[in-house]
Image: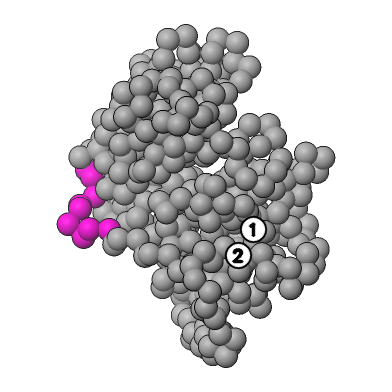
Amino acid sequence: MDDERIAGLLSRLDDGPHRPPRVDLARAVRDGRRRRRNRRAVAAGSTALAVVAAVTVVPLLREPTPPDPAPATVTPPTACEVETLPLPPGYVSGGVTGGDPTGRYLVGLLNLPDRKEPHPVLWVDGKVRELPASVRSAPMREITSSGWMIGQDMDAGYVYRFDPTNQPGSPDGDGTDPVRRLPGGPNLHPAGINEAGRIAGNRYSPDDPNWFVPMVWASPTSDPVELPLPGPGWTGRALGIDDDGTIIGTVATDARYPRGYLWRSDGTGEFLPSVPAAGEFRPVSIRNSWVIGHTWREQPGPGREAVRLNLTTGEFVPLPAMFSAVSVNARGWVAGVGDRSAGLFTDAGLLDLGVPRPDPARADLVYVMVSVVSDDGRTIGGRWSPDGKRLPAQPVRWSCR
């Protein structure tokens, strides 16, 4: 797609009144020079930051409302209790896949005994809520505090708005099917939705597992726009979206060597910085300008290390050894897993969430995974099995205090 067509498509996402673009080229050049000076200065210290900016300066979306800052009065939790979440009749296994920032909503996927296709489930304050039949055939994986859910089946993306006032199993108020295909055609994979309802995702090729095109939807009912890539021959994949419209992902010319990337709400794209003395940074999740991900180290031996990046300051913070980062909240607290354990990394350090071990003699077989942490750090969703080799996983919630 040529530059003029990209510019035209991106400009359509600005649904406000006609006006000059918000980003002027002269200012973008000055900002780029300032960023380069800052990078040179930071490179002299221990938190060097190397950001290569793409040329695109077309407004991507109307200027979003900044998220509310995380209240400073919330202190990190010091203890957590884990409980198995209830399953609807007939289901035997599953896990939490996502949740809203408040921790009230948790969404997950469950399996029937045949385990052929997973079905979505919603928990509200820890209680199962029945979903319409059409929702049960479209696996939903994330949810916002206003009830918007996104999911994907084999060849399409879907959106659904949970309405707590509807009776279980009922259609929308106008009598239509509440599940809607994500606009844009087949082979779409929504990857994240923010509190404003903007969606980041990808178009993929069913014939080429390495071919992805990153996309953004201004709302669940808007047509998608392709996100610009660094140049010809590049592919990319969007992985998540922040409330300010920033999208994280990876780009590559060779699928074996993806590089961390972000798209800002003004249409510019940038390579994410490399971790000082460690190497390429590959993002996993973003929230309130905190990005978590992993880097590969070579010494003392090849391996993956979890790190947290503050986009505002450019500072990297290494996470505890043997810790795989999964989800980050608005305070930069990180939920993840270690060796058959789950933890929450906060300003106070690493908190062991606690994992049930009904048979200490077989504790080495415990399987555990976390998926999401609320903004106050009090609710964490995931799944676990006391014997990952024999017993199916169960959805769990950690309630912390």
* Amino acid type, callout 1: Val
The secondary structure type at the circle numbered 1 is strand
Which residue is more in the foreground, 64 or 340?
A: 64
Q: What residue does disc 1 label? A: 225
Q: Residues within 10 Å of mark 1 (few under 14, many from 20)?
A: many
Quarter of image, res 164: top left
Q: Position of residue 101 (x, y in %)?
A: 35, 46
The numbered disc on residue 308 is none
Q: Is residue 295 visible?
A: no
Q: Position of residue 372 (x, y in %)?
A: 41, 41
- Residue under the image location 65 percent in, 61 percent down: 227
Q: Is residue 55 visible?
A: yes
- Residue under the image location 72 percent in, 45 percent down: 204
Q: Position of residue 155 (x, y in %)?
A: 70, 35
Work out which residue is located at the far left of the displayed protein and give it: 73
Work out which residue is located at the far front of the displayed protein and give it: 174
Q: Is residue 103 magenta?
A: no
The secondary structure type at the circle numbered 2 is helix
Q: What residue does disc 2 label? A: 12
Q: Is residue 72 magenta?
A: yes
Q: Relative to residue 16, is residue 146 depicted above or below?
A: above
Residue 381 located left or right of residue 21: left
Which residue is more in the foreground, 245 or 283?
A: 245
Q: Are marks 2 and 1 in contact (CB under 8 Å)?
A: yes
- Residue under the image location 80 percent in, 43 percent down: 208
Q: Relative to residue 137, is residue 155 depicted above or below?
A: below
The region drawn magenta spans 70-78
Q: Position of residue 8 (x, y in %)?
A: 68, 69
Q: Quadrant of the C terminus?
A: top left
Which residue is more in the foreground, 35 or 120?
A: 120
* Amino acid type, callout 2: Arg
- Residue under the image location 60 percent in, 49 percent down: 201
